[in-house]
Image (cartoon, rainbow, N blue to C red):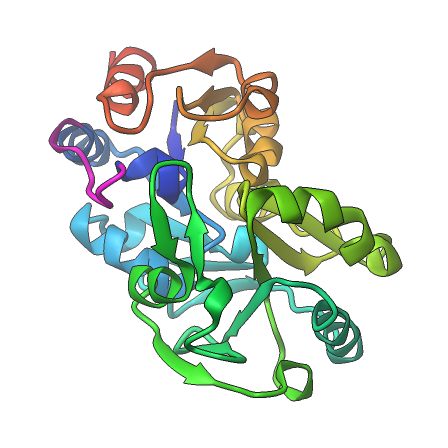
Amino acid sequence: MEMIVLDIDGTLINDNNQILKQTQEVITQAQQDHKKIVLASGRPTKGILQFSKKLKIKKDNGFIISYNGAKVTDISGKEIFLNETIEKKLSHKILTRLESFDVITFIDNDEYLFVKDAYDDLAYIDDGEKKINIIKSERDDNELKLCEFKRLYDYNEDLNKILVAADRNYLKKHLKKIIEPFQHEINAEFSADYILEITKKNVHKANGLEIILSKLKIERNNVIAFGDGENDISMLEYVGVGVAMGNANNKVKKHADIITTENNKSGIAEIIEKYVLS
């Protein structure tokens, strides 16, 4: 294997938003062995950069796939190889339609996180173990500044992604109604069962990865990828070895070659040691 691709949330980091020591060590060893490292997430580029620094990924050794594949950069986030945005007329229609549903809508420009109401009563969402303030979580996890924008549909800049958060049961029940008018123009994937991520049609992590592999002239069979969310399925299927985390749902696991332990355990390190470093 010449490349390791890692999703962030629920994969690279544990439930305390930390990278396990064992994972850190094998990534360091993989770099010493001249393996390429790619961090692939639905997060904004800025929200991924912090982990590239923690892993001490070298400039010539890594890449970032952000916004579920809409943007691809070098590990510094400065050199851009792909930047797919939702056409402004379409984003206006989507954001207008979302006003009719009991959801929280987020957009960002990789510096500011824009929401309609920073104190929205819907912000407290059950993530399966506890209630979290999803607005605070998105702001802090991605190191963005929070800004209220009363009419998101009037935002006039290009958008890589529109993020929608809501109670998991509500989102599942209303998903079809939300996306139906745009289903042939967008890609809508769940990164968690209470978070829906909307990007331009045909944008997904595998497309972003293809750009990198083409640049480096690496065959996809020489790539191993780790993920836990439905937005990881495309890359798990695309690479030579797709690894689903133990905390992934059954839909994701069906598309993986290997199922490792959950993100709170050392499953990533064990798989890399076996398939990459041995």
Q: Is residue 153 above or below residue 52?
A: below
The answer, for residue 75, to whether it is visible in the render is no
Residue drawn 17% across and 50% down? Answer: 54
Residue drawn 41% across and 25% down? Answer: 247
**How many discs appear?**
0
Q: Is residue 211 above or below residue 237?
A: below
Q: Is residue 277 above or below residue 263?
A: above
> Which segment is the magenta one?
15-22
Q: Quadrant of residue 111?
A: bottom left
Q: Residue furthest front?
A: 121
| Viewport quadrant of the N terminus | top left
Of residues 234 and 35, the one nearer the viewer is 234
Query: Does the magenta segment cover residue 9?
Result: no
Of residues 100 and 255, the one nearer the viewer is 100
Q: Quadrant of residue 124?
A: bottom left
Q: Is residue 110 above or below residue 134?
A: below
